[in-house]
Amino acid sequence: MAKNYFNRYVWLIDVISRYGHITKRDIDDLWRSSSLNENHENAIPERTFHNHRESILDTFGLEIGFDRSRGYYIVNSDDFEGDGVRSWMLESMSISNILRESADMRSRILFEKVPSSSKWLPVIVNAMKDGKALEMTYQSFTRLDPTTSETHPYCLKIFRQRWYMLAKTIGKEELRIYSLDRILDIKVMNKALLLPAGFDAAEFFSDYFGIIIGHNVQPSIMEVKATAEQARYLESLPLHPSQTTVEVTPEYTVYRYRLVPTFDLKQEILSRGSSLEVLSPEWFREEIVEELNKAVHNYR
């Protein structure tokens, strides 16, 4: 029953979020056809409904307010959307509820698999929560044999459907990125996690695109020219949070960014083909040109 109530909370949040403002009568209309309505209720009882509101505030930190003329709404939705973890968690559970209510459509809704997320993710999260180091056996793409080392997890990040861990490995001077799908084994150690005071994962990655980090490399100001069509994509989903518009014409738009030009960024720009052109810095533009020339040579 507890799990069912949890799913009810997610359902209620999702309904109110989608409609913006919604009356109790309209909520009840939707509830009657929900697969979560196992008792075939005609409406959510008033006392139960308000208990759900309180539980949602306690569990998710979301306040459901009431406007006499427009109905119920999420009071602090903007604050919630700024919390990446909670937003991602709620979105995942909302999708799960949608699939449950549309079981006959599952064969027509396709997802990408996230390697090793279910196997190693809980272990690492619990280690970070408990402040413990890890003994990790890892098979790098660049080594023939796996290595086992004491590793201190700083944070986790998902990128391109893969989970990565930023960690300090004993014996290595610099922080390193580990892909969870390359981990062969992990054991939680009885050693305290060595995490610098005030470490902020979002701030650490703020100057990067993707997960590859550049040690002792300062961010650069990069300008790119996007075709009119590509600009529409970049307006809806910016390449990086630092994106600002420099020039707009009917044929193209110039954008400016402040970030570290890493391998991930180079691969992303190359994947956009002729729709994106690096204008500066010059050295990074030359690297892109060199990669394009190599690609052309391969097809000769």
Image (tube, rainbow, N blue to C red):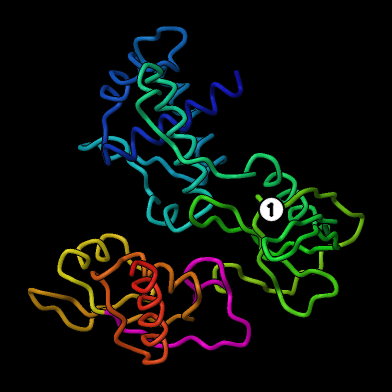
Q: Position of residue 21 (x, y in %)?
A: 26, 38
Which segment is the magenta one?
A: 205-224
Relative vertical location of residue 219 with respect to residue 211 in this rendering, above or below: below
Residue at (38% x, 71% y) in the render: 295
Count residues near mark 1 (Cα–Cα under 10 Å), then give few for <14, some for 14-19, many for 20+: some
Which of the 4 quarters of the picture holds residue 166? Answer: bottom right
Q: Position of residue 162 (x, y in %)?
A: 56, 52
Farthest-out residue, bottom = 282
In the rendered image, residue 132 lying in the magenta stretch gets the answer no
Which of the 4 quarters of the picture holds residue 294? Answer: bottom left
Residue at (50% x, 37% y) in the render: 56
In the rendered image, residue 222 lying in the magenta stretch gets the answer yes
Quarter of the N terminus within the rendering: top right
Tell me if 77 is positioned left or right of 144 in this view: left
Quarter of the C terminus within the rendering: bottom left
Q: Which of 69 and 202 lies nearest the eye of the viewer?
A: 202
Tell me if 60 is positioned left or right of 273 in this view: right
- Give the labeled residue for mark 1: 182
